[in-house]
Amino acid sequence: MYPSRFHRAPRPRIRENVNEAIRAREVRAVFPDGTVEVIPTSAAVRKAQDMGLDLILIAPTAEPPVAKAMDYGQWQYENKKKQHEAKKKQHVIQVKELKFRPNTDDHDYDFKMKHAIRFLGEGNRVKAVVQFRGREIAHVDLGKKLLMRFAGDLAGHGQVEGQPKLEGRNAHVIISPAKKDVKPAKAPKPATPPAAPQSAPGPQETPAQ
């Protein structure tokens, strides 16, 4: 019989930069009452734990490192919330590809034009590709004219990045979103000069009887 194997119990997960996991010998500790002390890390951890809080390293590259006494769960929640908000504000620019043939009809052309306008309005780039099959490669000039027409029709929505390029049996051109025009600020209206005060009428003379 083979000897039985003993499995080690998984080690508890250590929270980095929290309490005893802080490696710095001393820290600039910030406490909820606003006091700031440069003290040994072990003393700062004890003081935070006496308050029912954790000591969290928030600026490890500072000299000395800055740590804050706060609830770890609350800190984790706030961090995730900030990351979520930052991710929402980020916009990843994508390249949307639209494929044509040298003899693309007007209906298909207009359909893809609408898609391109939407893509550019969303802040993405558009790659228009003309595919040549068989003997169509002999009419590269027709494909390039189609691409330049497409770029010209999108002039109000995007700007073309260079001339059409031929790669293998495909010709393409890339169109990036047009920069939004910044409306000039309206000039302030000139102040209306105050009306001149009217002089009070003098006393009227009573004719002698």
Image (spheres, rainbow, N blue to C red):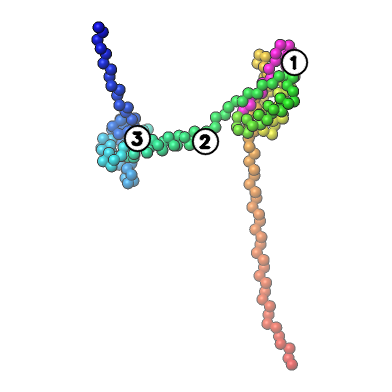
**Camera-side residue of 33 and 82:** 82
Q: Is residue 97 left or right of residue 74?
A: right
Residue 45 bears which disc, if any? none
**Does residue 47 show up?**
no
* Residue beneath disc 3: 57
Q: Which sits in the foreground, 139 or 108? A: 108
Outermost residue toward the bottom in this view: 209
Amino acid type, residue under disc 2 in the picture = Lys
- CA gap, disc 1 and disc 2: 45 Å
- Viewed as shown, does residue 23 lie left or right of 181? left
Kind of residue at disc 3:
Leu
Compared with 209, 15 (above or below) is above
Residue 26 position, x and y percent, is: 29, 35
Mark toward the start of the polypeptide (3 vs 2): 3
Q: Where is residue 20 drawn, in percent x and y?
A: 28, 32
Residue 133 colored in magenta in the image:
yes
Task: Look at the numbered discs 1 and 2 and tell me whether their residues touch, using CB distance below 8 Å.
Answer: no
Q: Residue at x 26, y 35 (%)?
A: 42
Indicate which disc, 1 or 2, sits on the residue closer to the N terminus.
Answer: 2
Q: Is residue 125 above or below residue 1?
A: below
What's the distance in space between the residues labelled 1 and 3, CA to CA? 66 Å
Q: Which residue is mark 1?
A: 139
What residue span does the magenta drawing correspond to?
Answer: 125-141
Measured as percent of width and height from the top left, residue 50 is found at 26, 41
**Do the residues bearing badges 1 and 3 touch, measured as CB atoms within 8 Å?**
no
Q: Which residue is mark 2?
A: 89
Image quarter for residue 67?
Answer: top left
Mark 1: which secondary structure?
Answer: helix
